[in-house]
Amino acid sequence: MTVYDVAVLGGGPGGYCAAIRAAQLGAKVALVEKDAVGGTCTNRGCIPTKALAASASLLSRMRASLEMGIRLPAPPELDFSQVAARRDRVVAALRDGIEKLIRAHRVELFRSFGALAGPGKLTLAGREPGLIEARRVILATGSEPVRLPFLPVDGERVVTSDDLLAQNTLPRRLAVVGGGVIGCEFASIYRTFGVEVAVVELLDRLLPAMDASLGKLLERSFKKAGIQVLTSSRVEGYDPQAETLRLSDGKALPADMVLVAVGRRAVSDGFGFEQAGVRLQRGRVVVDDRMAAGSEGIFAAGDVVGRTWLAHTAMREGEVAAACALGHEERMRYTAVPAVVFSQPEIAVVGLQPAEAEAQKIEFAEGTFFYGASGKALCDGEAEGKLGILAEPGGGKVLGGWVAGAHADLLIAEVALAVDRGITAREFADVIHAHPTLPEMVREAAADAFGMAVHKAPARRRPAPEKQV
């Protein structure tokens, strides 16, 4: 029997990145995945959602074409069957690309359900049953949508994000239960597609895991777009015959489809984790900064760890887990993990945020810049938005940042690099940025953090010095 250096259980972002990195480091690797490679992100999450978001964004731009001097012969029409077909093509292309990468790195892929069966052993069931042995094992079994007992999911009227992304038709009225990232993205997309949308959030604002100012900003944008937002509201149930979502205050929201978007939970049952000595906490695998899972030779990465529930975090965790499993000295850091909400407007954050800094009594200076003062944003017709940089007072190290506006996903990357590498606001502001471009705004915000933004009026104008005669 072949003994692998590393066996990876799960082929999502954390798993396939771990497998490829281990192979790059010279290991003989087995990757066990019962479903399609790419995991939730590629097949039922990030990628199909962003494909829909891209169609929604283009539709919004086309509707505003007259503002750019372009008169269309007729109003743009949505063909959702074609939108869905494109979504599926994008998913298939990326999934096939990942599988080719796995094979190009000579990782052996087993299409089976795998479970731990003792030290260094995995039992396989399904398409390729059997037993494999490995010196090190990396767990990357992912996550699934959280379900609510009072909103039983049937996959048709009450759905999870997995179900919604398999739909080829649009509902007339969509009620979104949960105002976090997933709920807000779908609310924004489906409203742009012409669906009546209501968002119900138990807490007092949208995006409760982010700074309050960003949640309020998005709520204003949603209401302007015609999305009904009900915060501090509790759902009691759904009546499919009456097509109404019942709230605890007696309100009944009309909805022919309800999306349950209240978060995700780690998938850790049925894999023999605890029998193998892997410690679980609320279903999540407990790891150290080497991604070691507390049992000799076992590591973990991705949503089964449940640190951020982000695919890009899972990818890096997988790389670190693979390196440490093979004896290399790497450590996982979470200080500069960007998070993006692909709503309209886009919202992105990284590092320390204002409310968090104030709660921790961390001194900081915040520089901001408005899209409306950017030449490129004005030229592009995307002048609504704002961004901010948090730094140590006096132009010290960049601690974090946020963006609310077009292309936030691109702009936040430079801030993440600054946070991760300990770049100061002064060093940031010294870097020449091409003009006219959107990244100039980030440079201006960094300069504003120590009062030296050239393209922004000072907060308090000093009187001009008198002329000497």
Image (cartoon, grey):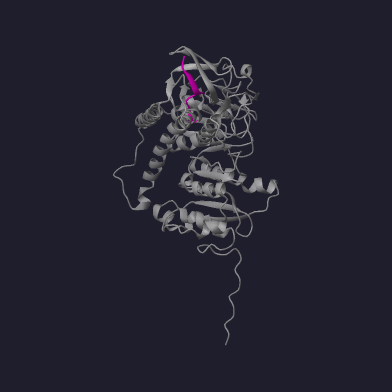
**Image mark count:** 0
- Percent coordinates x, y for residue 369 in the rendering: 53, 56
Asked whether residue 72 is drawn in magenta, I would say: no
On-image quarter of the C terminus: bottom right
Residue that protrudes farthest toward the left in the picture: 73
Q: Residue at x 51, y 60 (%)?
A: 430
The answer to whether any part of residue 121 appears in the image is: yes
Q: Is residue 253 left or right of residue 79?
A: right
The answer to whether any part of residue 370 appears in the image is: no
Q: Is residue 239 above or below residue 469?
A: above
Q: Is residue 134 above or below residue 49?
A: above
Q: Residue at x 51, y 40 (%)?
A: 341
444 or 260, which is in the foreground? 444
Q: Residue at x 67, y 53 (%)?
A: 363
Residue that protrudes farthest toward the bottom in the picture: 469
- Percent coordinates x, y for residue 12 in the rendering: 48, 27
- Percent coordinates x, y for residue 143 in the rendering: 54, 26
- Percent coordinates x, y for residue 89 in the rendering: 35, 30
221 or 453, which is in the foreground? 453
Q: Which residues are magenta?
A: 1-13
Q: Is residue 225 left or right of residue 282?
A: left
The quadrant in which residue 118 appears is: top right
